[in-house]
Image (cartoon, rainbow, N blue to C red):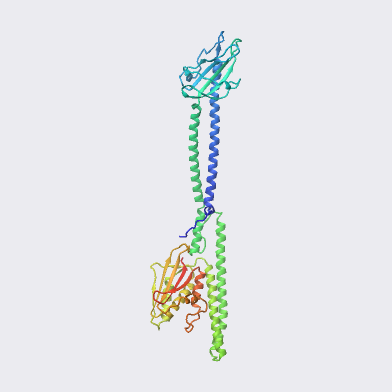
Amino acid sequence: MMSLHWRPGLWLQSLRVRLLAGTLLWIALTIVVAGWGLNHLFREYVQQQFQAELNLHLNQLTAVLNVDHAGTAFIPEPLSDPRFQQPFSGFYWQIDRLPDDTDPGQVGVQRSRSLWDGVLTIPTDTTEQGDDYLRLLAGPDGQTLLVLKREVQPPEDAAAPYLLIVAAEQRFMTQPLARFTRMLWLSLTLLAVGLVLAVVVQLLIGLHPLAQLRRQLAAVRDGDAPSIEGHFPTEVQPLVDEFNGVLSRNAQVVSHARTQAGNLAHAVKTPLSILANAAEQDNTDFGRLVREQTSMARRQVDYHLMRARAAAAVQVTGLRTPIRQPLEALVRVMARLHAESTVKIDLILPKDDLIFKGEEQDLQEMLGNLLDNACKWAVHQVVVGVRRLPPDVQHKDARLLFTVDDDGKGLAADQMLLVFKRGVRADEMAPGSGLGLAIVRDLAQLYGGDAQARTSHLGGLGITLSLPAA
């Protein structure tokens, strides 16, 4: 499984996170504004209705107000709302005689039965003429009242002006507001949760084609499919078609390049072979020089042709090579090639058939050079093994680790790096071109792997070859 290294701001690169964050922010802002607006409108409505009700009672109180010949106010009949008759019901009315030049005035000349033995005292700074508006006032039994008042002048000339007061407990307005506010925010919260769930589902469904596209790309990379397959939405399908076109074009270019490289190698090798054959019949110094130079030229052509072919193969996606059959075939070939020696080749393979993410010919080239080199220097035994390594911090993909060990004389520590250089041989007296291990390392590095020399557990030389696993 590919590891994901977190870095600051990585979550902002996720399209899903950005869409979800933007939608959640907009939903939250919309819910808050809607909640505040609806609550404000309902508060205004309740307050207006409450004031309208008190104004209705105040109008009724004004209509039934009578003043006798002595100038004393009285109410001939009770008001229509029965709550004015119930003690401490929360609804009250009261009539005060206002002071003038000849009369100090009197509080509570007439009052509702609901006030019982209490009176409402209006502060002197709130008795503006002709102003009917709501104000807070302390009422009986610790109640907080909203008061509406009105100053009236009876038609009798001798009558003093009166102040009519209608009051109701504040809770009759605040309780409906509180209930509405709770229900409003509960409803808006449920609405927000529903919208969030809808957004999440929409993102999962809407971005599902991208996840499908990623799986198809992985299948192409791993060699399970030659191109991206499946049906995608109209917004994504053009991208898929273009990518498949690039894959097809790339395969054609690589195939053409490899064909051209083969043709060039054939064209060069034919004259070299003719020169080498002609030089075989000439035992002079010139003939030996021609044989030496043609042999060197052929090795160089083989080396660079191998690199060009391998570089082209690496560009092709979807290459997969099971390793069991090529390895077993190479062991049989090496056993026949070195049949005159006493070297025994032991092949240790896991039960599962591991797969190399590359071309079979390149795998045979690398392992063949390693086996041939080991059989040349081994005394009695060569051990070949392979295992799969999972991804780690240094390698994001799985790897195949091949090991080839022999029981020969081995190499000194300073020679273990030199043997991978082109044209360098551990023993100049031994036959060979000095290109075998160089070819192995070059090919491995083209595939993103590597080859390392070490001291074998058998006492000789050990080579470790790391290659990508499919």
- Residue shown at the point (39%, 70%) measured from the top left: 349
Hey, which residue is sitting farthest top in the picture? Answer: 69
- Say above or below: 156 vs 269: above
139 and 34: which is toward the camera: 139
Q: Is residue 157 left or right of residue 425?
A: right
- The percent position of residue 289, horizontal first and vertical second, equals 56, 87
Front-most of residues 288 and 231: 288
In the displayed structure, 101 sits above or below 413; it is above
The x and y percentages for residue 103 are 58, 12
At horizontal 53% and vertical 29% (from top left) the residue drawn is 46
Q: Is residue 203 visible?
A: yes
Total marks placed: 0
Residue at (51%, 66%) from the top-left corner? Answer: 317
* Residue 271 falls in image quadrant: bottom right
Above-or-below relation of 340 to 352: below
Whole-percent x and y of residue 36?
54, 36
Quadrant in which the N terminus appears: bottom left
Question: Residue 148: percent from the left, percent from the top?
Answer: 55, 22
Residue 243 versus residue 152: which sits nearer the camera?
152
**Residue 230 seen in this snapshot:** no
Relative height, residue 175 to residue 410 (above, below): above
- Tell me what residue is drawn at x 54 percent, y 81 percent: 298
Q: Nearer the viewer, residue 260 or 312?
A: 312
